[in-house]
Image (cartoon, rainbow, N blue to C red):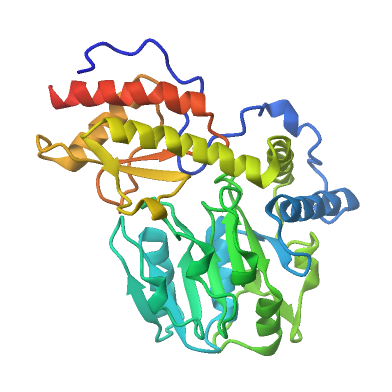
Amino acid sequence: MTTKAPATKPTNPRFSSGPCAKPPTFTLDKLADAPLGRSHRAAVGKAKLLAAIETTRDVLGVPADYKIGIVPASDTGAYEMAMWNLLGERPVEMLAWESFGSGWVTDVIKQLKIDAQVTTADYGEIVDFAQVNFDNDVCFTWNGTTSGVRVPSKDSIPAERAGLTLCDATSAAFATDLPWDRLDVTTFSWQKVLGGEGAHGVLILSPRAVARLESYTPAWPLPKIFRLTKGGKLIDGIFTGATINTPSMLCVEDYLFALDWAKSVGGLKGLIARADANTAAITDFVAEHDWIDFLATDPATRSNTSVCLKFTDDRITDGAAFAKAIAKRLESENVALDIGAYRDAPPGLRIWCGATVETSDIDAMLPWLAYAFEQEINS
């Protein structure tokens, strides 16, 4: 039993799942080179945007023939843009095992009014990819941010397929070695694994996705902010730094800093190693305490970024109230901020373990979690 408060606290108590912790070396003066008050269409603005695109390609290992664009409205805007432009040419399968995937289902069924096949799994589970027909267009999240469940391996998706795969990778990019040959559309936002600022999304298109854009016109009208083609051809400027609408050059500068930091810790391999180390610390903690467990039931599908936990002690009569009390106690001690489960998810905790979080902070936070549990269960 832990009756005494631990002596050590995390240096950085920020474990939010989005916006996420800034890189450990971040200070505001790192943004001093941002071309504020300048047009993003001026040479300096275009150069910064192109550098963000090409450094993204370098760090993530995106193939040279894939297009990378910076688009409005975070990952949500990027994924909506993809669905509105690409879906409808052939049958669609929607896969969902948490709230954001369910949101894409709602938009396809109710807004685009596509008669899609919908396959879902409960929180903590994942759909059976072996039953998915990849001759259809398939929409899914790689990592369920609100459930802590991710696609177990690249082999879940065939390299040879007739349909397009549309992957929301917002809490997987920079923490997973994404299989580009199996992904036709990939989207993410800066405020996740690299701790960037919000409001901007990244849209990555395979040559197959570009071919679809240039050969297929959706039946529905497209808002200006969604349009990726003109006269039947891809608007190539979007993918070289000429954004659809005005980006924040301060946010771009912040992203460039985060990308440089990513390279300094070993690039993608280093980022994955840092996230894996953070998750391993929690795995060890869970193994040592019988009152807490992962929400993800299969270890092969457990996220290494958005780690979702549930309380399993039989003495807990109101799981939601108990989890909120734990999160509130840890926040009041300035030990862990913003770690409550997502509002649509089962009661519990969600601890961000992406690369910008230091393992030493995870190690310092976990004894406090044990202390908070003992205080609440015996109160």
Q: Nearer the viewer, residue 34 or 19?
A: 19
Q: Residue at x 60, y 54 (%)?
A: 177
Q: Quadrant of residue 194?
A: top right
Residue at 53% across, 66% down:
167
Residue 343 appears in the picture as rendered: yes
Q: Position of residue 20 (x, y in %)?
A: 52, 39
Q: Is residue 237 above or below residue 267?
A: below
Q: Quadrant of the C terminus?
A: top left
Say if 121 sits above or below 268 in the image: below
- Asked if residue 306 is positioned above or below residue 74 in the image, the reply reads above
- Look at the image and tell me whether residue 73 can be seen: no
In this picture, residue 212 sits left or right of residue 63: left
User: Which of the 4 image quarters holds residue 329?
Assistant: top left
Looking at the picture, how far across and down is residue 180, in whole percent? Answer: 64, 65
Nearest to the observer: residue 370 or residue 200 = 370
Residue at the (44%, 28%) spot, across then down: 362
The image position of residue 199, as x and y in percent, is 59, 51
- x 26%, y 11%: residue: 4
Instruction: Tell me if residue 40 comes above or below residue 186 in the rendering.
Output: above
Asked whether, in this view, residue 164 is left or right of residue 207, the answer is: left
Residue 95's x, y, as percent? 40, 71
**Numbered label tally:** 0
Quadrant position of the N terminus in the picture: top left
